[in-house]
Image (spheres, helix red, strand yellow):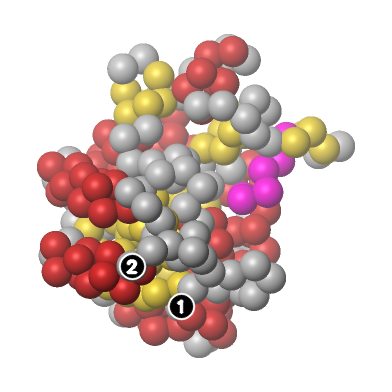
Amino acid sequence: MIYFVTGTDTEVGKTRVSAGLLAAAKAEGFTTLGLKPIAAGCEATPEGLKNEDALALMAASTLRLPYRDVNPIALAPPIAPHIAAAEVGQPIQVERLAAAMPRQGMSDVDLCLVEGAGGWRLPIGQGQTLPQWVAQEGWPVVMVVGMKLGCLNHALLTAEAIRADGLTLAGWIANRVDPAMSRYQDNLETLKAMLDAPLLAEVPFLENEAASTHLAEAAHRLTAGG
């Protein structure tokens, strides 16, 4: 199964959740692959530009692919990807993304997660947005909700946009990014009542603990097709 992983904003834990899902699925004996097609804020290495999120997904995957297959569009400036791409003269297009995907590897594994960049309605340049590509691929979407003040609006709008783009919201994961969030449980119950999609998992605020222990059931559901 292939899923696209989006978030309600940037810095809501998409990578931690994605890597946790991959690790949990691996622990259950499934084969896995995590991809980060677009990454800005990459660091220069002797092997070229590399991104810490992409490296985390690679470490959690059972299928080993070359870095360029996991993160085909690697950009150094830590800014909006379409701006970073324009600065380096490498425009991002839906066609470029589609051609860059390691299709054979994606079809060979039990669970493939394609992690987006930023939130859902991400511009990629020339009037195009990332959801146009996801819609072309037809992948169901897993939404990571960063549980903090403002998450109700962000989550409901994101879910609405996913469906308006003709895609299936396979489920959502509540990731507590603010340990001091007021009325956490009340906010969670509001989202459960209003999102009309299954809550796949709750991930508590974590500093050094891996997320995989909280995502085993979600990983099992996703590998089984939801």
Range covered by the magenta-colored residues: 49-54
Callout 1: few (<14), some (14-19), or many (20+) C-alpha neighbours within 10 Å?
many
| Residue receiving disc 2 | 183
Question: What amino acid type is highlighted by mark number 1?
Answer: Leu
Q: Please state which of residues 7 and 110 is positioned toward the viewer in this rendering.
A: 7
Image spot of residue 147 (x, y percent): 39, 60
Instruction: Give the spatial CA distance, label 1 vs label 2.
Output: 23 Å
Q: Residues within 10 Å of mark 2 (few under 14, many from 20)?
A: few
Quarter where residue 195 is shown: bottom left
Residue 132 shown left or right of residue 26 in the figure: left
- Of all residues, the one furthest to the bottom in this rendering is 28
Quadrant in the picture for the N terminus: bottom left
Q: Disc 2 residue type?
A: Arg
Queried whether the magenta region covers residue 163, the answer comes back as no
| Residue topped by disc 1 | 215
> Visible in this render: residue 178?
yes
Q: Quadrant of residue 225?
A: bottom left
Q: Position of residue 50 (x, y in %)?
A: 71, 41
